[in-house]
Amino acid sequence: MHKLKITGGKRLIGEIKISGAKNSALPILAASLLSSKNITLTNVPQLKDISTMLTLLQSMGVEVIFDEKMRLILNAKEIKTFIAPYDLVKTMRASILVLGPLLSRFGEAEVSLPGGCAIGARPVNLHIEGLRAMGADIQVKNGYIMANAKKLYGADYYFPEISVTGTENIMMAAVFAEGKTVIGNAAKEPEISDLADFLRSMGAEIEGDGTDEIIVSGVKKLQESSHEVLPDRIETGTYLAAVAITGGRVLLKNTSSKFLESVIEKFKLAGADIQTGNDWISLDMHEKKLKAVNFETTPYPGFPTDMQAQFCALNTVADGEAEMRETIFENRFQHVVELHRMGANINIKGNTARSVGVPKLKAAPVMATDLRASAGLIIAALAADGETVIDRIYHIDRGYERIEEKLKQLGAIISRDSS
Ligand code: EPZ
């Protein structure tokens, strides 16, 4: 099992480039199933989840080529199977995103139920409900979603609970559906708009993305297209937190503050000096200690659940007390028990964690439980006294491209123990 070793206490200073957004690239890769023409993608992050999605697409017959300029070229002309098998889906829940495109273009899909993960049960009932509203016949048996639809019809579907990948699946399914689909209570994340931009570039007719009502008018076919994946706002926030906890300063390039307003507001409340440009963000703590900040995770444009563990880590050594409420997932505080091992003073009651800042954390052996929890532990380790060893870091490799390299560029003392 790979481990990361981090010796804390160094002030991080420097500049790094942000990669493309994992949660934008994944639905866009799945959307390549909709077209028989070449799709060319740039700024696709090199992550475990991306290679898992590419393996899944290739298993169905999608041609995948990386060209000499590291652009990703996909072609789904010859699809020979409509199955997303359990052994792939269990390693990456976002595989559920092939359901909508397969049904829309081929009228058939057999996708393993993703099952839960560390942060919650992660049901996909709303994806299924939305597709049934469009005329799909969907049975769930032996752990698989068996979906068939001679034709999908435009429908009005109102999400009883906001779902990011649920919105994406229905939007992709509606591309070839007959007539108009109105998605109510749609997710408004920037990754939804990035997917809509990509689909429109192929000829899909979509409007309202970024609002809570998305309207898709079915078309007959799509043409070839190229698209640059949006910068990763969660990677951006994660590195801002990594530098902030050490009292350092950083310039993040190839990113945008446009999609991080709620996070930047919290960094400013914590005492960070943040400047922004159209494709960069800088943070300078002027060697000051952070102030503790309260927050509550809510759907976009609120404070993102994917930044909760990172701010938990910040609050463990910040001045004062903080209240942190997780309203999206039912079990997303697993990093807290690991932070306790490092001397953090955080108590959980229901979906709320209360922290009291301590002067210093102590290095300890800890275990990553999920992608963003791992990021929280790395952030804590950067400020802890001594060498922290983080186990099960395959979680981190799913969502952060070349993390040691980027942190080393900022002066971090970090190494990977692959023994
Ligand atoms: C997406 O997951 C992201 N993943 C998650 O990022 C992110 O944390 C989450 O949205 C919330 O922002 C990708 O985009 C690949 P949801 P998703 O459907 O779509 C409930 C990361 O760290 N729900 O918006 O799976 C669900 O249980 C990952 O990069 C149903 O009940 O999340 C949750 O409580 C982690 N039934 C809430 O809705 C459904 O059919 C929001 O989930 C679907 C969802």
Image (spheres, rainbow, N blue to C red):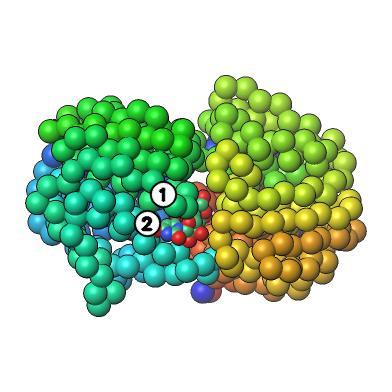
Q: Which residue corresponds to the image point at 70% horizontal and 46% vertical from the top-left?
A: 241
Mark 1 touching mark 2, by CB under 8 A? yes
Q: Around disc 2, counting alpha carbons within 10 Å, would you say few (fewer than 14), some (14 to 19), or many (20 or more)?
A: many
Residue 42 x/y as whole percent = 36, 34
Q: Secondary structure at mark 2?
A: helix
Q: Taking the image as drawn, is residue 334 in sight?
A: yes
Task: Identify the residue at horizontal 75%, vertical 44% (top origin).
Answer: 244
> Which residue lies under the disc numbered 1?
159
Three-letter code for the amino acid on which mark 1 is drawn: Phe
Which residue is tagged 2? 126
Q: Nearer the viewer, residue 47 or 323?
A: 323
Does label 2 point to a residue whose CB lies under 8 Å from ligand 1?
yes
Residue 346 screen position, x and y as percent: 79, 66
Q: Secondary structure at mark 1?
A: loop
Q: Residue furthest bottom?
A: 142
Q: Quadrant of residue 230?
A: top left
The percent position of residue 173, horizontal first and vertical second, equals: 25, 45
> Residue 353, percent across and down?
74, 62
> In the rendered structure, which disc, 1 or 2, sits on the residue that comes first in sequence?
2
